[in-house]
Image (cartoon, rainbow, N blue to C red):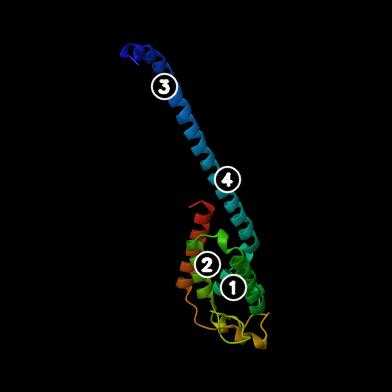
Amino acid sequence: MELTSLKEYVPLLAVLSPIVAVFVSGFWSNRSLEKLKSRLQASQAIVQKRVEIYSEIQESLNDIYCYIKRVGKWKTLTPIELINRKRLVDEKMHATRPFWSKGMRDAYKEFMDVCFVTNRGHKVNAGIVAEVVKYQKLDTWQNGFKEYYDGSFDESKLDNVNDKLMAALSKDFGVE
């Protein structure tokens, strides 16, 4: 092909090349946006599931904190009810573990470890980390309840792990 015949195609190439470039970049941008949209929808679904899970356990978590700190409705609860709340929350958190971040799972474990002593023996309930004498004067007290308590209460430690748990939950909900 001669150089003069190539010169005939230059105006055509000058017109077509921007169109091709726009088409290719548009295709690439659309593909990137679709991937982003898909990721955002998945993230939104995960956050919605987390909210659903939390709505099922929030009252029990709060009852655990309030009972050990001795605030709110703590006087109306018994150690048996508290252990049952722990079981309910543990079961839900274990079953839904894939939905939570590592930071949230770690904060949850730390909270429960401050609130309860576990693995106390075969067929022995977890022990509530609280000063038993503070609960013995309650109207709900029964003689067998003493076995439900174990360890010494540290209010600042409880507040610290509760704050960590709430911060981790907020982060998992995207409302830091």
- State the residue position of label 3: 17
Task: Single out the mark in the foreground, 4 or 2.
Answer: 4
- State the residue position of label 1: 67
Residue 140, located in which quarter of the rendered image? bottom right
Q: Residue furthest front?
A: 1
Q: Amino acid at mark 3?
A: Ser
Is 47 located above or below residue 59 in the figure? above
| Mark 2 or mark 1, earlier in chain | 1
Task: Single out the mark in the foreground, 2 or 1.
Answer: 2
Residue 37, located in which quarter of the rendered image? top right
Structural crowding at the residue carrying mark 1, measured as other residues with C-alpha within 10 Å and reported as few (<14), some (14–19) or many (≥20) = many
| Mark 1 or mark 3, earlier in chain | 3
| Mark 2 or mark 3, earlier in chain | 3
**Label 4 to label 3: alpha-carbon separation:** 36 Å
- State the residue position of label 2: 108
Q: Amino acid at mark 2?
A: Tyr
Q: Which disc is residue 81 wearing?
A: none
Structural crowding at the residue carrying mark 3, measured as other residues with C-alpha within 10 Å and reported as few (<14), some (14–19) or many (≥20) = few
- State the residue position of label 4: 41
Q: Which secondary structure, mark 2?
A: helix
Is residue 5 in sight in this rendering? yes
**Label 2 to label 3: alpha-carbon separation:** 58 Å
- In the picture, measured across the screen, residue 125 lies left or right of residue 3, that is right
Expressed as whole percent of the image width and height from the top left, the position of residue 138 reads 64, 80
Q: Amino acid at mark 1?
A: Tyr
Discs 4, 3 touching: Cβ within 8 Å: no
Is residue 73 in sight in this rendering? no
